[in-house]
Amino acid sequence: CEMPLLKVVLEYFDSITNEVCSHDATLTIPRVSELSEDQQKLDVEIDGHVNRVQTCAVLKAAKQLGDNNKCEEGRKMLSDQIAKIQESVSADLPLCARLIKDLNVAKEAMVSYQRYVTDGSHRISNFKESHSRQRAAPQGYEEEFSGFTYVNAARFDMQSMY
């Protein structure tokens, strides 16, 4: 089964024949009518990044709630996201462990409006930016988290030079 993906139409003026000409091309991709059992399995890595993107949206919404002195609603959102990640097929990935840890720290930082204003707002912004940009920003844990979530071999090589 072929599925059309893109159709391109080119119109131009042919100065030799003094006419407007048109050509079109369609790009199709092959699709199977039924997925095999192997194709139906969720990709664990992709699911982990789906959790990452959803966590960024939840952190952004929780920060907005905190800014409006609705910390309890923000904490509920964070708790729901933690539960969702824990139930996902990617729950055992280091990325998801990091997401859960950051969500728990954010939840604790929203225990009261005073705590949110002094500590939580900054932490939640930092977590959101770190995960949305996939950067290894320092998180300021009392004990630094051992999972180097977004640090690759090139970064380790660069750090070893200093």
Image (cartoon, rainbow, N blue to C red):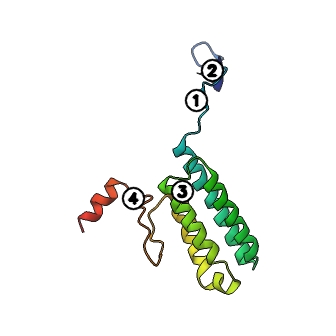
Name the N-terminal-most of marks 2 and 1: 2
Q: Residues within 10 Å of mark 2 (few under 14, many from 20)?
A: few
Look at 39% across and 58% down and name the residue there.
Answer: 151
**Mark pair 1, 3: CA separation:** 23 Å
Residue at numbered disc 2: 32
- Mark 1 is surrounded, within 10 Å at the Cα level, by few (under 14), some (14 to 19) or many (20 or more) other residues, namely few
Task: Identify the amino acid type marked 2.
Answer: Val
The residue labelled by disc 3 is 96
Where is residue 160 shown, x and y percent of the image?
25, 64
Name the residue at 66% across, 23% down.
4
Query: Which residue does the image show at 32% across and 55% down from the upper left?
Result: 154
Q: Amino acid at mark 1?
A: Gln
Disc 1 target residue: 39
Indicate left or right for 33 with 99 as reference.
right
Per the image, label 4 sits on a secondary structure element best described as loop
Looking at the rendered structure, which numbered label has been put on residue 151?
Answer: 4
Within 10 angstroms of label 3, few (less than 14), some, or many (20 or more) residues? many
